[in-house]
Image: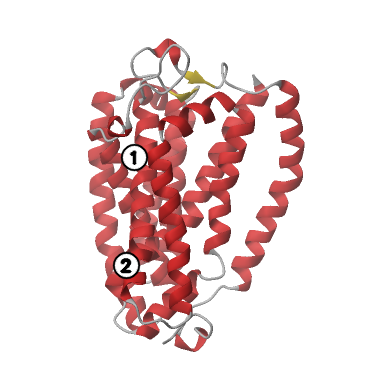
Amino acid sequence: MILPFIWYLLIGVLIAGYALLDGFDLGVGILYPFITKTAQQKAVLRTSIGPVWDGNEVWLLTAGGALFAAFPAVYATVFSGFYLAMMLVLFCLIFRAVSLEPRVQRQRNTAWDWAFFIGSALPALLFGVAIGNIIRGVPIDAQGEFGGTFFTLLNPFSLLVGVLALSMFLKHGAAWVALRTDGALQRRGAKVLSVAHWVFIALFVITTIVAATTQTDQVKRVIDNALGWIMIVVILAGIVLTRWGMARKRDGYAFIGSALDMLGLVGLMAVGNYPNLVPALNDPTRSLTVGNSHSSHLTLMVMGIIALIGVPLVLAYTALVYTKFKGRISSAHTEGYGQE
């Protein structure tokens, strides 16, 4: 069971990495039409994420590939049951990418600005809805196949988690704007962050109360596990650090605090769900778990060797890119990103 557990952990790390890295540029896309007043400010926001946003999405692709290789039964159930939702996310991400190109080519078409917004907001919401269903459980038949429809996924608890995720991405994006821009744009980002922070706290409290009354098994696992308490501490530390950073105008600390909230929430879900990967809503014995849905020992071993080589390289490259493009962005840095 040690190799399946390691891969459960690694997939969780990949999901956390995606939330942490792509979370802020999705948040920037959500804010894009609302906090920019001029073409130069729009170019500044595009420039702030331009060198990194496509690399950030690789973490999602890697997580999907790792899930396919390590837990093929889970991959089959999730990607067939969530097919329409996955297609919506895929089309949104495609339009999001395409929407940036006409702007770089200086086409004055605000429809592409709204395409960038929708391509950022809808995936943020749907990712949260998907996580909500993984926490709540989905109907699974005796053959291990999803037994519901697209509208089965749109249940109240999962929609609540989706809105929480949307607020989390929005807050993370505002923290990035406050950290990476200057002047009026930086002040607007800080103002949005101040509001989004309290909205996130309120939604987190509401979701926690609802989960405590409806998802009792997951809550019990969190309470009975020291890692669960560590994740709670990480979330609370992130909330405090974000607020402290805003109060002291230390934008870097506010961004780190927002990142801690994301990592803590993903960790909390992982602790609460283990050993389930996809809980069965109708019959717990049909749940897909770490123990009954993993690949062969040889497959997991070979993948582990590849991960030992590849993951450090990816982390080193990611660190290099973010180090190379650190610092605040002003209109002087927007050449090539469409100032119109």
Q: Residue at x 40, y 51 (%)?
A: 238
Mark carried by residue 167: none
Q: Position of residue 150 (x, y in %)?
A: 32, 34
Residue 117 vertical position relative to residue 2 in the rendered view, above or below: below
Mark count: 2
- Residue bearing the label numbered 1: 129
Quadrant containing the N terminus is top right
Which is nearer the N-term, disc 2 or disc 1?
2
Q: Are marks 2 and 1 in contact (CB under 8 Å)?
A: no
> What's under tag 1, amino acid-wise?
Val
Residue 186 vertical position relative to residue 2 in the rendered view, above or below: below
Would residue 318 appear left or right of 212 to someone viewing this image?
right
Would residue 194 appear left or right of 259 to someone viewing this image?
left
Mark carried by residue 114: 2
Answer with the quarter of the image where residue 147 lies.
top left
Tell which of 127 and 170 is nearer to you. 127
Question: Which type of secondary structure does the marked residue at label 1 adopt?
Answer: helix
Tell which of 196 and 284 is nearer to you. 284
Answer with the quarter of the image where residue 282 lies.
top left
User: Can residue 171 be seen here?
Assistant: no
Q: Residue at x 64, y 32 (%)?
A: 69
- Give how far apart the Cα atoms at labels 2 and 1 are: 22 Å
Tell which of 81 and 10 is nearer to you. 81
Tell which of 5 and 110 is nearer to you. 110
Q: Position of residue 328 (x, y in %)?
A: 48, 78
Question: Which type of secondary structure does the marked residue at label 2 adopt?
Answer: helix
Q: Position of residue 212 (x, y in %)?
A: 27, 27
